[in-house]
Image (spheres, helix red, strand yellow):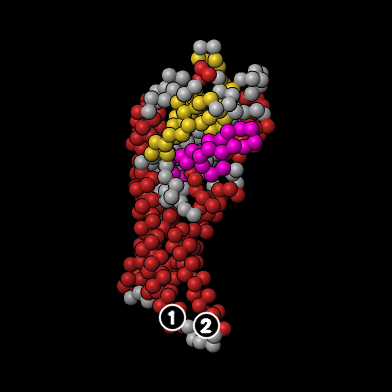
Amino acid sequence: MSRVLFVGLFLLLISLFLHWRFLSVTRAPARFARTADVLLVVLWLCATIGFGSGVVLDPSWARVPAFVGLTWLAVVLYLFLGTVLVGLVCTVLRVASRAMGRDSAALRLRVSRVGSAMVAVVSVSAVAYGLVEASTPRVTNTVVALGGLPPEFEGLRVALVSDIHAGPTRGAGFVRTVVDSVNAQNPDVVLLDGDLIDGTVDLVGADLDPLRELRAPSGVFAVSGNHEFYAGDGGEWLDFWSTLGIDVLRNERTTLTRGDGAIDIAGINDATAPAPYEPDLIEALNGIETDRFVLLMAHQPKQALEASDLGVDLQVSGHTHAGQIWPLRYLVPLQQPSVEGLDTIDNTTLYTTRGAGAWGPPVRVAAPPEISMLELTRG
């Protein structure tokens, strides 16, 4: 919770700076300035509700103001980046004009005003696009060639769903959309790779009820993400998922058979899960046959570093959202070995899905949400 408060305070300070900056650049009339002051207070009140929705506030009433407030934070991000860019341009003009012995004050004022107007238009437009982009996850199809796959499992269709983040801004209707899209693909197996929620079981649990309608002949499996542990005891969430007919893998594995062939699906808790839920891949693989094909569910791509050392053939992950809001994707490699899609970590094939939902702002820019359909083949 202290991390949330720190981020909230930081964003508030940026918002106040932008508020002052845009009002001063435009030389807004007093009446307009007062209206803008009131609007800023309302938007930040909505953002505060967004931080608490699903955790301490009931989303049944908090979801609408939360949607507005958290969307505002995405606008703040682009306003801030754009303002920094305009400031850099003005600084370059000032330095260059001094070097040439000229006065650039009038030019810098015009650049500042025109640039600020453009920043405002682009910021609102980008977020509006991002709202539409985030509203409906698209189904993507990827063929994954795996040398160790038993011939009996040739063409196995795997539906990979991660990062729904039901709660603050998305409810049961969004979850049902995801479920309907998955079922329409007729997958052989469904893998739910964590961060399905943001909030507590009491306030958000009902939003996941559509998950009980997932259908796959080889089963529906799930592992925890980091967000399951943010609002309290993540174990309570894992227990709740089990009541929805989901096979929850808690540092354990299960075996799928087809004819004479068999593969193991292993699942471990998130890399940041607290005691007593720490991830334990060694325990999950304990007693496994050395030549058995292993598909590992692990929420964070970086868990593939250990998986490769222990002989895992394929790991599926989420967590990154592919950055969710451009240009944040360029920060992902600072923490994770893969941003999205197929990759290879030593001897392990890794697939990282962009995720079906959105965390915080219900916005995605240049990182569309996805339901990943993987077709496993021998290669």
Residue at image location 49% in from the left, 45% down from the top: 322
Q: For the residue marked with disc 2, what is the amino acid?
A: Ser
Residue 128 at least partly seen: yes
Q: Is residue 114 above or below residue 266?
A: below
The reply to whether the C-beta atoms of the residues labelled 2 and 1 are less than 8 Å apart is yes
Q: Identify the residue at the far front of this view.
A: 379
Magenta region: which residues?
338-361
Task: Judge by depth and name the residue closer to the eye, 128 or 196.
Answer: 128
Q: Position of residue 20 (x, y in %)?
A: 44, 70
> Dot 1, crowdedness within 10 Å: few (<14), some or many (≥20)?
few
The amino acid on which the numbered mark 1 sits, given as a three-letter code, is Leu
Circle 1: element type = helix
Q: Which residue is mark 2?
A: 97
Q: CA distance from mark 2 to mark 1?
A: 10 Å
**Rendering coords of residue 199 (x, y %):** 46, 39
Query: In this view of the protein, which residue sits in the foreground, 187 or 57?
Result: 187
Which residue is at a point 51% across and 12% down the rendered structure image?
259
Q: Quadrant of residue 207?
A: top left
Could you tell me which residue is drawn at 40 percent across and 28 percent down?
211
Considering the numbered disc 2 on the image, is that residue within a helix, a strand or a loop?
helix
Residue 223 drawn at (x, y percent): 53, 30
Residue at left offset 38%, top offset 61%: 122
* Residue under label 1: 107
Q: Is residue 63 visible?
A: no
Sooner in the amino-acid sequence: mark 2 or mark 1: 2
In the image, farthest residue toward the left: 31
Q: Quarter-wise, where is residue 338 in the image?
A: top right
Q: Quadrant of the C terminus?
A: top right
